[in-house]
Amino acid sequence: MLRAVLAVLALGAGPADPAREVRLVMGATAEVQAMGLADPTPALAAAFAALQRVDDRMSLFKPSELTTLNHAGRARVSGDLRAVLWHALDVSYASAGAFDPTVEPLVRAAGHLGGKARRLSRCQRWRLLARVGTAHVHLDPATREVRLDPGTRLDFGGIAKGYAVDQALEALRKAGAAGGLVDLGGSSLGVFGNSTTVAVRDPGDPAAPPWATFTLADAALASSGGDQRRGHILDPRTGLPAGKVLAATVVAGTAMEADALSTAVYVLGAEEGLALLARRGAAGVVLTREGGRAVIRASPGFAASRALRAAAGVTVRP
């Protein structure tokens, strides 16, 4: 299980305290909050059902629609899987491959899908990289069929949690909630009808004071890197562990967009990553150390628009 790299500190003040429920979903602790409902039970149940549906279709840790596709190499897919794949391909093109849903062969060989983590040799990486790339994925919009080239497999680990958060938020809206929040494992979060304060944790020590806090309102965010399993994010272009920055947090209109972009930014690094966010209409912060000092690189206007407050000793700069 990946440890949280973000923490929700407080839901904004409202006419009544939100109903809140916590469950274990998608290998992570999921928290759902709903506001403005006389009986919030159906809304909370619908939100958790949406999270579970995405897990059942896109998990690589149990039989799922995704594992079936990977094993067979071709299949007609559900609307959920098609939506995530289309978006994953879009972000892959936009990031020049820094985010790539076909990274599964590399991730599995490196032991990040339930095995023992290990560093791949140069020859192993070269052999596996031949199976990685969006050109190996073929979609037929008319038949809704997806075909993968031999040896190519999909991994939605960098986007499925965001999509699940979006689906759970939509379930709360359909149930009539005036406001809602879905926090999936501390790395994907969405809120509507209210605001919440988010703490960006120390990427080296989750027990240490956070590097910063900021406000999130009617938006979604995701974070990659931080104190998650070391080396688990690979650069799909090289097969090597990404490590240009310590962590990346992205705010976007949807959690799916934020999830994929946070992975891309973590791989690209601060300069290229923040430029990618600007092109996508998103924003974010990148955590680094420069000369031994804690530094937060932020998108233009991020600090002012989201009330970013850095801790003592942490420098914020563009």
Image: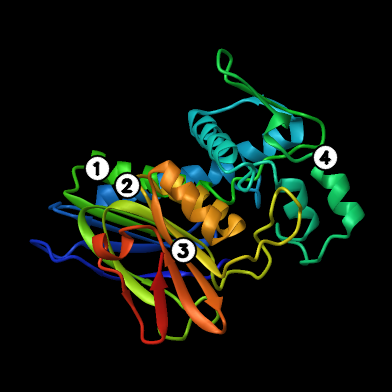
- The amino acid beneath tag 3 is Gly
Asked if residue 167 can be seen in this view, the reply is: yes
Dot 2 or dot 3: first in sequence order is: 2
Could you tell me the amino acid type at mark 4?
Ala
Do residues under tags 1 and 2 come within 8 Å of each other at their CB atoms? yes
**Mark nearer the N terminus (3 vs 4):** 4
First reached walking from the N terminus: tag 3 or tag 1? 1
Q: Position of residue 36 (x, y in %)?
A: 13, 53
| Amino acid type for the residue under numbered disc 1 | Arg
Q: Nearer the viewer, mark 3 or mark 4?
A: 4
Q: Residues within 10 Å of mark 4 (few under 14, many from 20)?
A: few
Residue that carries the numbered disc 1 in the rendered image: 173
Mark 3 → mark 4, Cα distance in angstroms:
33 Å
As measured in the structure, the alpha-carbon distance from the residue carrying label 1 to the one carrying label 2 is 6 Å
Point 56% across, 12% down: residue: 142
Q: Is residue 210 visible?
A: no
Q: Could you tell me which residue is drawn at 71 percent across and 60 percent down?
A: 112
- Dot 4 or dot 1: first in sequence order is 4
- Image location of residue 105, percent across then percent down: 77, 47
Q: Position of residue 60 (x, y in %)?
A: 65, 48
Residue linked to disc 2 = 169
Within 10 Å of the Cα at label 1, are there few (<14), some (14-19), or many (20+) other Cα atoms?
Answer: some
Q: Which residue is mark 4?
A: 130
Label 2: element kind: helix
> Is 133 left, or right, of 255 in this rendering?
right
Q: Look at the image and name its color scheme.
A: rainbow
Amino acid identity at mark 2: Leu
Q: Secondary structure at mark 4?
A: loop
Closer to the chain start, of discs 4 and 2, is 4
Residue 185 appears left or right of 272: left
- Image x and y of residue 85, in percent: 56, 34
